Image (cartoon, grey):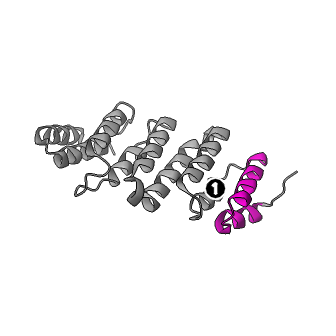
Amino acid sequence: MPRYSTDELRHIFGNSTDFNELFEAFRDALEQQIQDVELYRLLFWNNSLSPDELCLFGEKLAKEFPGIAYDTYMWLASVFEVTYSAYDNFDLAIKYYRKAAEAKPNEPDPYLDACDCYDPDLNIPPVDVLIDFVQEGLKHVNHRKNLMLRLARLYEFSGDHEQAEYFRRLAEELGGDEG
């Protein structure tokens, strides 16, 4: 029997600072089979939770409801990108962009959003990590032009002008055929 209504869950996820209360509400939401990503977003943006606690909730949610795993991982990545990037140099954001890409390999957004994390002045996250990730995406994504353009830019940042030009040319060859 549910302990909380959807409105009560929203209130707890958005406002509670008590981990035990959040955990109980989360467990209740899972027992109710609630698969509304919008509800869990409130939990992910609750600033009283540590990165480890957010990972715990997100991993459990994705495991329980594989159909929303991609959205769960994308939201976790964006939360870590915005809120914890100064502490972990985007490691958690990249980790969850990778998980999102595993959940839906054909989607370009995890690869493109990961590139948006890059700070060329600090080389954070490391450009070679992003290059490898986007290269992997080229194997799966159907519309590859934007990935190629991002790769060209990443190679430019890394100082490899030959590879940058190579991917720029490949993208141009695709022309308007891809989005």
Rendered position, 164 above or below 13: above
Q: Main secondary structure of the magenta part?
A: helix
Q: Is residue 177 visible?
A: no
Identity of the residue furthest to the top in this view: 139
Using a 10 Å C-alpha cutoff, classify the residue at mark 1 as few (fewer than 14 neighbours), some (14 to 19) or many (20 or more).
many
Residue that extends furthest to the right in the rendered view of this protein = 1
Mark 1 lies on residue: 40
Q: Is label 1 in a helix, a strand or a loop?
A: helix
Residue type, numbered disc 1: Tyr
- Nearer to the camera, 163 or 79: 79
Question: Who's the residue at 11% across and 42% down the image?
Answer: 161
Please indicate whether residue 155 sits to the left or right of residue 75 in the image: left
Q: Residue at x 88, y 50 (%)?
A: 1
**Residue 127 visible in image:** yes
**Residue 160 pos. (x, y %):** 14, 41
Residue 135 to residue 97: above or below? above
The span shown in magenta is 6-33
- x, y percentage for residue 53? 59, 52
Q: Is residue 79 above or below residue 107?
A: below
